Amino acid sequence: MSPTSLLTTLLVAAASVRLAAAASAQVFSPPGKGPLKQTANYTSFSNSTLHDHKVVKGKAFDRIIQIWLENTDFEVAASSPMFESLSEQGITFTNFHSTTHPSEPNYIASAGGDFFGAADDNMYHIPSNISCVVDLLEDRGVSWATYQENMPTDSFYGYSYTQPNYINSSAAPYIYYYRKHNPLIIYDAVSQDPERVKRVRTFNDFANDVVNGTLPQWMFITPNMVNDAHDTTIDFAADFLEYWLLPLLTDPRVNGERTLILLTFDENESFGVQNTIYAVALGTAVPVNLRGTTDDTVYSHYSTLSTVQNNWDLKSLGRQDTNASIASVFDFVAKQTGHKNTPAAPNQVPHFNLTGVASGPLSSAHYVPFAAPNVNAKGAGKGGVFLRPGINLKLTADKLPAPVNLTALNTTTPWQMSPETTSGKKMIKCQGAACP
Ligand SMILES: *[C@@H]1O[C@H](CO)[C@@H](O)[C@H](O)[C@H]1NC(C)=O
Ligand SMILES: *[C@@H]1O[C@H](CO)[C@@H](O)[C@H](O)[C@H]1NC(C)=O
Ligand SMILES: *[C@@H]1O[C@H](CO)[C@@H](O)[C@H](O)[C@H]1NC(C)=O
Ligand SMILES: *[C@@H]1O[C@H](CO)[C@@H](O)[C@H](O)[C@H]1NC(C)=O
Ligand SMILES: *[C@@H]1O[C@H](CO)[C@@H](O)[C@H](O)[C@H]1NC(C)=O
Ligand SMILES: *[C@@H]1O[C@H](CO)[C@@H](O)[C@H](O)[C@H]1NC(C)=O
Ligand SMILES: *[C@@H]1O[C@H](CO)[C@@H](O)[C@H](O)[C@H]1NC(C)=O
Ligand SMILES: *[C@@H]1O[C@H](CO)[C@@H](O)[C@H](O)[C@H]1NC(C)=O
Ligand SMILES: *[C@@H]1O[C@H](CO)[C@@H](O)[C@H](O)[C@H]1NC(C)=O
């Protein structure tokens, strides 16, 4: 084939790929009759409600609802009419960073204060001696749950779930749910604890918990793979927010007194630029005089952890949640609690867009074992660093062995599982010299 005809062939092929993509572009369809009505499109109906009636007073808010969308650059979100309108009702953080690429490490970081070297969306679990935010919340009696749209049952352990396509019933079955967007199930401290794992809940449970008045105080909410813009566009996500979030913003059972709603994204779509994401603080806890304003403090996903610790005077995890340069407490909260932030200077903000270069226990190419938390770290709350049973405090970060390339030894990190794994008991055994 001549270079010209090869080029023509490639151009035609590229054009037909684009056409195919355009033809299959999905259009938002509501999964049910509103956010507070259970629907068969979510696979199983709720069997239970939580019983969280006790409210532990926070200094700036009594409830936090985190909602994560997917893979969108700051400017793209900020220029969408839906997000412009949400920004008018809240504080837009213009210097908020994801920690890395791709998705899963960011979700892991949101719960554990580190992404532990993860650099892909594989199936991992984190051993039960490693603490996460749930330990801090329970330590002070703050109730919590995560709600995952289209997760088929409570406590679901699997890698993903394929179900009938509810948007187009003649199309092939669709994967609406992925574990990689469900941070708490990845921590054995949650998944292997029969009481805790019940709090990994579905959107039908959410409807049930709201209607019964038993929503907890700390929530992490993951919309499905189309509604969060992952497989679709920001306009699709905007339609979802109109269906799901807008009615809840005016519902006192959700956005009641002293409620903070943080709507953000896991990561920037463009890997080649600094990983800045749109984030807006909404809800009744946002002071009226700050609504419609922006805040350009340097924040990262670790800031949400430190803000929660500061608000309820929780212990810390002793990881990046205590790294003052990248884990500033949200300014409007810090002003109310008297906390002093020391954020990185704009020219010293690390590049959060690097993939696959961090060593850690969830990296096969740069494997090092889990380290104990830094027990001397000073968090934004009170009472020191939380330690889980089974943690070996002698394994401090500076005593770990040099990173090993397990990929070159034809094995993976021991914390990786086969995507066929459906329960916490059937874990893939580590094979190789570096296994613990
Ligand atoms: C499932 O979603 C589709 C698409 O929006 C909708 O037509 C259908 O009524 C929904 N099913 C139920 C039970 O709500
Ligand atoms: C409360 O939850 C139960 C299930 O535990 C459910 O049957 C009931 O319908 C809910 N209450 C209301 C008012 O919807
Ligand atoms: C409710 O219980 C039934 C029967 O055990 C189960 O099939 C269903 O998945 C449960 N619902 C949820 C949301 O887990
Ligand atoms: C629904 O799916 C079928 C099968 O893939 C496809 O031919 C059709 O164009 C789709 N409909 C819409 C509205 O996208
Ligand atoms: C990260 O972003 C910076 C600044 O935009 C850019 O110079 C750099 O090339 C990016 N790095 C990667 C690995 O994409
Ligand atoms: C805190 O974060 C900065 C920026 O990423 C990093 O250079 C520094 O090593 C971190 N400190 C600790 C103790 O991890
Ligand atoms: C954590 O537990 C795992 C599994 O039991 C063990 O291999 C590891 O050494 C422990 N790490 C620390 C830091 O305690
Ligand atoms: C690890 O080993 C694999 C397979 O040999 C190789 O492709 C990769 O570049 C290595 N990574 C590092 C960081 O050495
Ligand atoms: C890894 O597997 C490759 C291909 O099967 C083989 O050539 C190589 O010798 C193996 N390396 C080790 C360290 O076992």
Image (tube, helix red, strand yellow):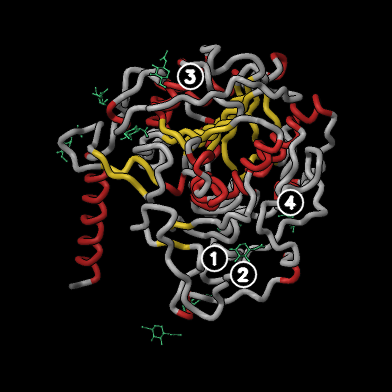
Q: Position of residue 295 (x, y in %)?
A: 70, 31
Q: Which residue is mark 3?
A: 210
Q: CA distance from mark 2 to mark 1?
A: 8 Å
Q: Going from the N terminus, do you reach mark 3 or mark 1 first?
A: 3
Give the quadrant of residue 255: top right
Which quadrant of the rendered structure holds the C terminus? Answer: bottom right
The answer to which of marks 2 and 3 sits earlier in the sequence is 3
Q: What residue do we see at 41% from left, 32% from top?
A: 202
The residue under the point 71% across, 52% down is 319
Q: Quadrant of residue 170?
A: top left
Q: Is residue 237 left or right of residue 84?
A: left
| Among the two numbered marks 4 and 1 on one chain, the one whose residue lies closer to the N terminus | 4
Determine the CA span between mark 3 and mark 4: 34 Å
Instruction: Report which residue position mark 2 lands on.
Output: 368
Amino acid carrying label 1: it is Ser
Residue lying at the far left in this picture: please name it: 170
For label 1, the residue is 363
Q: Amino acid at mark 4?
A: Gly
SS at circle 1: loop
